[in-house]
Image (cartoon, grey):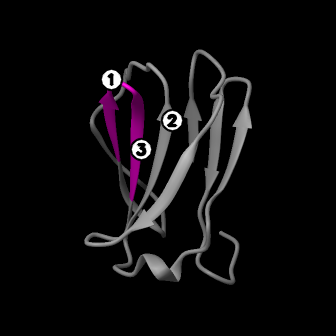
Amino acid sequence: MTVLTQTPVETTRSFHSTSPARLVVDLPGSWQSGVAASIACKSELMARVRVGVHPDKVRLVLDYKDQDAQDFAEPIIEKRPTGLVITVSKAGKKE
């Protein structure tokens, strides 16, 4: 998944969570979102992405189609000058 921003992303925090199975990615700082709060995905692994803007961060929640977050490897989050590239995969397998 590619996340486009108007300024570089300095830091990120991410973690897996359950009920439902999901990956949470926080971008600390003051952000505004120009996208819908929930976006359906055309992916074998993800059902949708939810975007929440908070005073101290924007939170991206990637809802997995599978119900067990433990089946997924740690995400690869690459910073780019205009955003991030977030790569998710099943444990032991690159997608």
Give the quarter of the figure containing the C terminus: bottom right
**30 or 42, which lies in front?**
30
- What element does badge 2 sit on? strand
Residue 74: x and y, percent?
Answer: 61, 67
Eyeballing the image, is 16 above or below 30? Answer: below
Mark 2 or mark 1, which has the lower sequence index? 2
Q: In this view, does 67 lie above or below 32?
A: below
Q: Does the magenta stretch include residue 56?
A: yes
User: Can you identify the residue that label 3 sits on?
Assistant: 60
Task: Please report the residue visible at 51 percent of the width from the left and 82 percent of the height from the top.
Answer: 71
- Given contact means CB atoms under 8 Å apart, are the residues at marks 3 and 2 in contact? yes
Q: What residue type is labelled 1?
A: Pro
Checking the image for residue 27, the label placed there is 2
Q: What residue type is labelled 2?
A: Leu
Percent from the top left, x then y, of residue 94? 70, 72
Distance between the alpha carbons at the discs numbered 3 and 2: 8 Å
Quarter residue 52 falls in: top left
Q: Is residue 8 left or right of residue 44?
A: right
| Badge 1 vs badge 3, beta-carbon distance below 8 Å | no
* Closer to viewer: mark 1 or mark 3: 1
SS assignment for the magenta stretch, majority? strand
Instruction: Using a 10 Å C-alpha cutoff, classify the residue at mark 1 as few (fewer than 14 neighbours), some (14 to 19) or many (20 or more).
Output: few
Q: Which residue is drawn at 57% across and 28% down?
A: 4
| Rendered image: mark on residue 11 | none
**Label 1 belongs to which residue?**
55
| Magenta residue check for 6 | no
What span is in magenta?
A: 50-62
Query: Could you tell which of marks 1 and 3 lies nearer the N-terminus?
Result: 1
**Which residue sits at x=61%, y=61%?**
75
9 versus 71 height, above or below: above
